Image (cartoon, grey):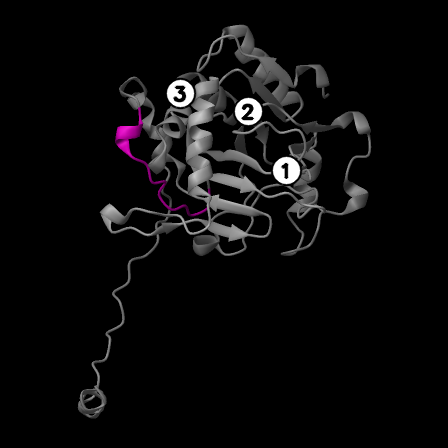
């Protein structure tokens, strides 16, 4: 049975959880499917990550020139995404290797967690929603196509800007109802409106200040509410080690991980069924005639 009063927890000390705080958050995740942690990330760290996310989600941004990489910002309707936060931000790497958070995630998932994937995301102001109620059951499409996977996942959203509108919308205690309805739907088919719980007490809009960390069961019905101004967040999906889909490796910089957190590097041990390496097709050399034509034309 859901309990709205449990959804928000005021955390006393950054990057740590007192036993009573951890118990309250875990109870909210189990009963409601969602929890908001205020104060878990200190303001200066949220501000630093905000600046990194703002740069990394700017159209035209490319990371990795020094290593001969070319990681670009991905653009879609309403969002700008950068998929490798742990390469560009020490704060991002510190957050996902923090013991208090990973211990909590482990208790919810029932297994030591791995990162399914993460991204820095800029949401643009909109007039109409681009997503309605849904659950997260897909995985990396390059490796898995459009297949759905029933594996439980816990997602975190760290607000990097104050969110007065356009925060996470969530229907409390909806995971057990939503999963069997959503799994048989065809690709692109919307969640049936007559299966969405209508009790207004079960619907919450998570509009919170910068630095708030939201955790939620991805099998619960959720959607982004319509943002009236730009919003910056960091999304991370956590899964169990026996996650059944194929996953690409999560890229990170070891120098971004605090020395005190390196016993938690297991969270990056996520690769499952890696992409097959193929030799490139041979490039045919220009014919003698083409070379002569170019020489004469030049």
Q: Nearer the viewer, mark 2 or mark 3?
A: 2
Locate residue 223, reporting x and y percent. Answer: 66, 39
Location of residue 268 by image quarter? top left
Q: Nearer the viewer, mark 3 or mark 1?
A: 1
Q: Residue at x 34, y 37 (%)?
A: 87
Q: How many marks?
A: 3
Magenta range is 244-257
- Answer few, some or many: residues within 10 Å of disc 3's Cα (few below 14, many 20 plus, some between 14 and 19): some
- Residues 152 and 162: in front is 162
Q: Earlier in the sequence, mark 2 or mark 3?
A: 3
What's the mark number on residue 229?
1
The residue that mark 3 highlights is 98
The reply to whether the magenta stretch includes residue 248 is yes
Task: Give the main secondary structure of the magenta stretch.
Answer: loop
Q: Residue at x 24, y 75 (%)?
A: 283
The residue that mark 2 highlights is 210
Residue 162 in the figure: left or right of residue 64: right
Residue 177 in the figure: left or right of residue 248: right
> How far, Cα to Cα, is label 3 from label 1?
31 Å
Location of residue 94 by image quarter? top left
């Amino acid at each position: 049975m859901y309990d709205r009063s449990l959804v928000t927890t005021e955390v006393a000390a950054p990057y740590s959880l007192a036993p009573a705080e951890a118990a309250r958050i875990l109870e909210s995740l189990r009963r409601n499917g969602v929890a908001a942690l205020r104060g878990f990330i200190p303001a200066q760290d949220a501000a630093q990550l905000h600046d990194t996310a703002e740069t990394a989600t700017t159209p035209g941004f490319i990371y990795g020139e020094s290593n001969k990489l070319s990681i670009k910002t991905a653009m879609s309707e309403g969002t700008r995404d950068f998929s490798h936060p742990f390469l560009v931000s020490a704060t991002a790497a510190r957050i996902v290797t923090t013991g208090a958070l990973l211990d909590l995630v482990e208790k919810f998932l029932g297994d030591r967690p791995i990162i399914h994937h993460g991204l820095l995301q800029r949401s643009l102001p909109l007039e109409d929603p681009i997503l309605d109620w849904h659950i997260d059951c897909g995985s990396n499409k390059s490796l898995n196509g459009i297949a759905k996977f029933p594996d439980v996942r816990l997602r975190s959203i760290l607000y990097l800007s104050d969110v007065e509108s356009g925060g996470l919308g969530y229907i409390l205690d909806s995971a057990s109802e939503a999963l069997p309805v959503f799994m048989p739907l065809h690709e692109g088919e919307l969640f049936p409106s007559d299966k969405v719980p209508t009790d207004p007490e079960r619907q919450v809009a998570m509009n919170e200040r910068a630095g708030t960390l939201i955790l939620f069961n991805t099998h619960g019905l959720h959607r982004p509410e319509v943002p009236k101004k730009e919003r910056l967040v960091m999304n991370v999906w956590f899964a169990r080690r026996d996650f059944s889909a194929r996953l690409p490796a999560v890229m990170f910089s070891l120098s971004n991980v605090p020395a005190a957190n390196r016993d938690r590097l297991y969270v990056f041990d996520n690769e499952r069924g890696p992409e097959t390496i193929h030799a490139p097709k041979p490039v045919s050399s220009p014919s003698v005639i083409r070379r002569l034509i170019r020489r004469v034309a030049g």
